[in-house]
Image (cartoon, grey):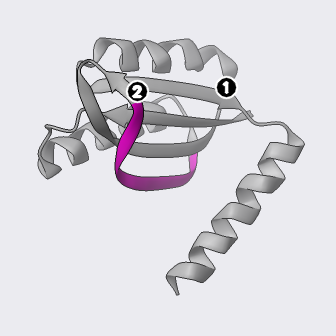
Amino acid sequence: MNHYETVFILNPVLSDVQIKETVEKFENFLVSRGAEIVSKEDWGLKKLAYPIQNKKSGFYHLFEFQLEGEHLAAFETEFRRDERVMRFITVKLDKHALAWAVKRRTKLTAKAN
């Protein structure tokens, strides 16, 4: 299984319920394909560097997960089909990026406590 990280931006006009449903949809999609969700982060509403679909902000979310490579194309197709998603990017983590992600997570949990 490969380690991946996906960041996606949701439309800022969505309600809290719609955002939660969208995030759960993608999480359930991953789990149904045998993925192991390592981490989920809600970065909240952030201002965009440039307008996307005439919007100046968006709700950012991050998934870090382990998944077999053949399922990744179907996962990204789901993002393209969903009109609530403005942008997304999926990156395969190498050993250095994986170590950095672990360090970032421990820092976030220490900050939350």
Tell me if residue 46 comes above or below residue 29 in the rendering.
below
Local crowd at mark 1 within 10 Å, few (<14), some, or many (≥20)? few
Residue toward you, 24 or 33: 24
Label disc, if present, on residue 50 of the rendered structure: 2
Q: Residue furthest right?
A: 95
Look at the image and say whether residue 15 sits in the magenta stretch.
Answer: no
Please give the label number shown on residue 49: none
Q: Which of marks 1 and 2 is in front?
A: 2
Amino acid type indicated by mark 1: Glu
Q: What is the spatial separation of the Cα atoms under label 1 and label 2, in whole angstroms?
A: 34 Å
Label 2 crowd bin: few (<14), some (14–19), many (20+), radius 10 Å: few
The reply, left or right, for residue 112 in relation to residue 93 is left
Place of residue 44 in the rendered image (x, y in percent of width and height, measured from the top left)? 35, 54
For the point 83% across and 54% down, the residue is: 99
**Left or right: 70, with 62 as reference point:** right
Residue 88 image offset from top left, x and y in percent: 47, 26
Residue 83 location (% of width, % of height): 23, 18
Query: In this image, 5 relative to 80: left or right?
Result: right
Q: Position of residue 10 (x, y in %)?
A: 30, 34
Most frequent secondary structure within the magenta stretch? strand
Residue bearing mark 1? 68
For the N terminus, which image quadrant?
top right
SS at badge 2: strand
Q: What element carries label 1?
A: loop
Q: Examine the image and state in which quarter residue 26 appears.
A: top left
On the picture, is 66 further left or further right than 75? right
For the magenta stretch, what is the residue range? 37-49
